[in-house]
Amino acid sequence: MQAKYDFIGVNYNTTRKADPYIFNRLLSFLNPSKDGTYLDIGCGTGNYTKQFDKKGYHFIGVDPSTEMLEEAKKSDTSIFWKIGKAETLEIPENSLDGVVASLTLHHWDSLDQGFASLQNVLKPEGNIVIFTATPKQMEGYWLCHYFPKMLEDSMIQMPSLKRIKTNLHKNGFSIEKIEKYFIKPDLEDLFLYSGKHNPKLYFIPEIRQGISSFSSLSNAVEVEKGLNSIEKDIDSGKINDIIKNYENTNGDYLFLVVKSVA
């Protein structure tokens, strides 16, 4: 079976670039050593993997999509790119010093198996840095007003913080730190809520193509209707009230720093 991003990853790198702020938070939380070996699970085209590599850190990039990894190899052949999933890593036991998992948990077939697999390949002192969003956070996206079915489906596939904690604990991990992330106006990695401050971004087909919710969960009728409504509300100024109504303190995404307690 082909991976989802074999179909929707066309021109992915035109809109999905490593964001400097997000990368620096991942780097700070991972706190890697130049002598260690690290894994970027669900690496896609390796935009963040390559940033770690440029800093002199040794990374392995794993993704289930052949299309994504072929794109990754075009600009960097020095990194070890490997087809695979979190649940079935073919990596030696106790060989990794840390793992980065950015916007990937919702694509895993099983959190339980995925975390069990990572526990197996991590060294005892290794850590995991996760960047994700929870359904509770997504309820606060103003996108819910314009694309209700798409957001509902997106929330269904996105694991809750409670579910993440439960599966981590089951596999000998605990969350050491949680940091909320609020979308910044200069965000360079144009994922789902990247247009929080600039609704016009969603009018660009290439941006929607690089977002799995739009590319694989949405239906054309709802997208067209939602975009038309956004355009009208921008012209009338109504969108400012809608956006204000969705303001909250939950954060748009989360950084989770995970340590082994096994």
Image (spheres, helix red, strand yellow):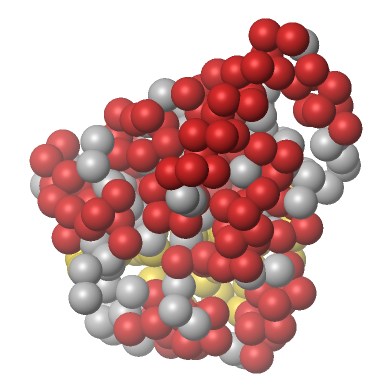
Q: Position of residue 122 (x, y in %)?
A: 45, 77
Residue 141 x %, y %: 72, 41
- 166 or 261: nearer the eye? 166
* Picture residue at 55% right of the left edge, 19% below the top: 200
Rendered residue at 64%/80% (across/down): 168
Q: Quadrant of residue 93?
A: bottom left
Residue at screen point 55% across, 29% down: 227
Of 147 and 200, nearer the camera is 147
Figure label count: 0
Front residue of this view, candidates 150 and 206? 150
Whether residue 87 is visible, yes or no, is yes
Q: Quadrant of the N terminus?
A: bottom left
Vertical placement of 43 versus 169: above or below? above
- Residue 60 spot, x, y in % from top left: 28, 61
Q: Quadrant of residue 90?
A: bottom left
Horizontally, is 91 left or right of 76 in the view? right
Classify the position of the C terminus by image quarter. Answer: bottom right
Q: Is residue 234 above or below residue 214?
A: above
Whether residue 25 is visible here, answered yes or no, is no
